[in-house]
Image: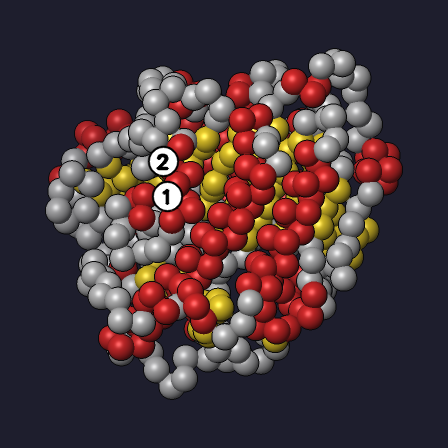
Amino acid sequence: MIKTITTAILSLLLPLCGHAADDSAKKNVLLICIDDLRPELGCYGKDYIKSPNIDRLASEGRRFSRHYVQAPSCGPSRYSLLTGLYGSASPSNGELFQRAENLEKAGPSLPAWLRDQGYNTVSIGKVSHHPGGWGGPDWDDTSQLEMPGSWTEQFMPCGPWKHPRGAMHGLANGEIRGPEKHSMAVFQSHDGPDDAYPDGLITEKGIAELTRLASDPKPFFLAIGLIRPHLPFGAPARYMEGYKDAKLPPIPHPEKPTGKTTWGPSGEFKQYDHFGHDAWTDPEHALAVRKHYAACVSYADSMVGQILAQLETLKIADDTIVVLWGDHGWHLGEHAVWGKHTLFEESLHSPLIVRSPGMKKPGEATDQIAETVDLYPTLCELVEIPVPENLSGQSLVAALNGDAAKEDSALSQWGGARSLRTGQYRLTLHKNGYVELYDHDSPEGETRNIATEEKELVEQLKLALDAKLR
């Protein structure tokens, strides 16, 4: 059943301010959020991955080769996307619900701000942490909002999965993960249509809403959140076909770090049934996991293609800014991690592609470091509305125009530790004062901590990190 919050109810929470009569001249915004998506795509130089639709978007827009999220977890990363703020050093998946409890102290969310400027704001699928954006045991209690006053309408089509919690961790044809550990397979390839898995339903609803919004004279901010490639790695069987005999490159630096780091064993990955195998010790099982992850990426890519095709069919592509964003990365064996929740590159580096009508030199990538918090001010500038003063990020419009004007570093936080990524280095500062420093110009990268050898550099980067938080 599709749960929906009507415009009438939300208007009680955030009355719309008056807006100019020429709202129809404003650009639309289509935001596509993809869960657990590594920058492991054709357009990011990975020729063993089949991602033609995202690759095409990159060829028509601007690919940020060095985009970093603010936290290696779904909830806090989406908090930063939707609020434009860094958040806490010890974030949790409840970050948006915590914000909702003190809404009078919070600045406007991105959808609330656009709504206030005359936009229809609609979310479908996993845009905030809970697909649909509600609370309750099954995430379908429409009286509990993650983002009060933000969306004119919000949807989560659940089909046979019954509720958003079931769809979030669902396999084919309504299979829902039970409370018991190992109650669901870690991967699956079911011979069925796209809507045998939840993202098919999310895409269908996204296309329907895109069609409806295109006929409204008001501009729209439509956010569509796809679940795959989040665990479990299940996708229609045809997306696995191209990977059955594929040769994937070896896992880089697969050993567990020897010194103090933010390493974790990833309890999420261990919750699933691995058929008696262990990805840490069984190379064949590890390869199977990686191939099923790749199949999920291709499945998500197909959903993106269908959504973008509808933009063309409706003849509104030239009036619509498109943003494709991965909420964080995912370790596939690097540093002996199968999951996220570290402050290593694999957890924090994710795809970001922006296509804006009339942009200069479309198809060229940029090495400009970008942060997720930069998207809020960027979209404000692109649609020519004021930028709230409380935001942590800086606009990326200069980079979209071929320049590099913003501060060239990114801040990420997890478990009380903070990490700063510059063009060459990653500094990670633990809450007890311990420091990790890695040189990305060295072939050793994030496998050798050089902090004790570069004390002066460490102090400089600490100052830069502190400046980020002021």
* CB contact under 8 Å: marks 1 and 2: yes
Q: How many numbered marks appear?
A: 2
SS class, disc 1 = helix
Q: Which quarter of the figure is the N terminus placed in?
A: bottom right
Q: Give the label on residue 32, or none.
A: none
The answer to whether residue 128 of the structure is visible from this angle is no
Residue at image point 42% right, 38% down: 57
Residue at image point 48% right, 78% down: 185
Residue carrying label 1:
55
SS class, disc 2 = helix
Q: Is residue 457 above or below residue 263?
A: above
Give, as a three-letter code, the residue at label 2.
Answer: Ser
Q: Is residue 258 left or right of residue 386?
A: left
- Along the line of sight, which residue is nearer the eye, 219 or 94? 219
Q: Which residue is situated farthest in the bottom direction here?
A: 276
- Along the line of sight, which residue is nearer the eye, 190 or 6? 190
The answer to whether residue 382 of the structure is visible from this angle is yes
Residue at image point 31% right, 72% down: 244
Give, as a three-letter code, the residue at label 1.
Answer: Asp
Residue 464 spot, x, y in % from top left: 34, 26
Q: Is residue 169 above or below residue 394?
A: below
Q: Is residue 429 above or below residue 156?
A: above
Corner quadrant of residue 253: bottom left
Residue at image point 73% right, 26% down: 218
Residue 278 spot, x, y in % from top left: 33, 78
The 10 Å Cα crowd at callout 2, few under 14, some 14 to 19, many 20 or more, is some
- What is the spatial separation of the Cα atoms under label 1 and label 2, in whole angstroms? 6 Å
Q: Is residue 196 left or right of residue 1?
A: left
Corner quadrant of residue 281: bottom left
Q: Is residue 3 left or right of residue 160?
A: right
Q: Give the label on residue 59, or none.
A: 2
Residue 83 spot, x, y in % from top left: 59, 34
